[in-house]
Amino acid sequence: MLAAIAGSTGVHTDELLSSWIRRHAEFYAVPPLAMLRHCLPEALSLHAADRSLNDGQILRLAAIFSTEPAVVRRMTFSNVGPSSRRLVAGKPLQSCSACHPGDHEPRPVLRSQLLGWRITCPLCGGLLRHISRHGPPSPFGHYHNAALRGERLLDDEAERGVRTWTSPAEIARLLLMRRVPKPVPRRYEPWRFRVLGAIIPDLDGVVATERRNLSPPASPILPLHLRPALLAGVAIVERAGPEMLQMLRGQMMGQNKARFSSAIDEITTLTSRSVAPSQLQLI
């Protein structure tokens, strides 16, 4: 029976698993969690199902809904590595006017709506817009090309496990640590200054104007109109190499500097280990 219903509530391209389950539940007029537990009795929540289905659970869902396991897997974040998980939001942040259909009820939630590293739609390449459709324009349009490079770096790591000399997600985290500008302003407010501002100087002024306390490093998802700055910063650091991280260390003080130093020392050590074998091959 569920297989027949699945045909009438087919998966939209890039749809999130919990959204698909909710639409089936709507058809049956049952709670979404009840629908999920009909298929997976051990399921804790729809949120957890989006993030951590194992192979056996994916196979069961695919069999019940008469679809391919690869289709079910792609609807989740199971493939996203630990370093990138903090860039997956808990609720939709953005949408694409071209690819997010508005003529379906209930409206599907797309997987890309939760990806905190994206500024463009993964389906059509168009710019994403704020979920409310009334978000402010980005003041960092002149960093667009660099932001696109940063988006690709983060996407390659999150979706395909591909990285260059270090984790782009870790770079993003480090760039959101607080810094002490030099010279120190007369009215120094620590919340205003992040390491990212040493690379993207416009950021300090924007933060001051908006009186906005940016996300902490543990949750490095910026509002859509500010996100290009972080993506561009990731691209700039990645291209410059570990030396830029060493330079940025000078922007820190106290415990923040100690934490930043510890992180980049670990990155430098891992980078040296990965480079050494490739150099030996040239001898």
Image: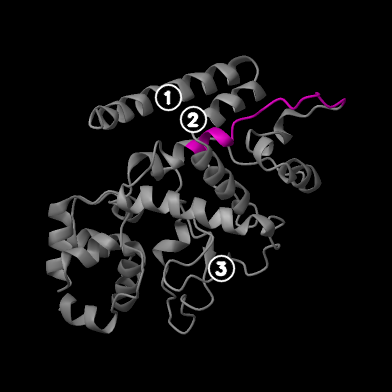
Q: SS at mark 2?
A: helix
Q: Which residue is mark 1?
A: 268
The x and y percentages for residue 101 are 46, 79
Earlier sequence position, callout 2 versus callout 1:
2
Q: Which quadrant is home to the N terminus?
A: bottom left
* Residue 263 vertical placement versus 115 (above, below): above
Q: Which residue is mark 2?
A: 242
Q: For residue 175: magenta?
A: yes
Asked whether 168 or 115 is in front, the reply is 168
Q: Is residue 283 left or right of residue 129?
A: left
* Residue 85 vertical placement versus 46 (above, below): above
Q: Is residue 117 visible?
A: no
Q: Which residues are magenta?
A: 171-186
Q: Which quadrant is home to the C terminus?
A: top left
The residue drawn where x is 53% and y is 38% is 240
Q: Circle 3: is it few (<14), some (14-19), or many (20+) Cα within 10 Å?
A: some
Quarter-of-image position of residue 130: bottom right
* Residue 227 vertical placement versus 11 (above, below): above
Q: For residue 174: magenta?
A: yes
The x and y percentages for residue 117 are 49, 52
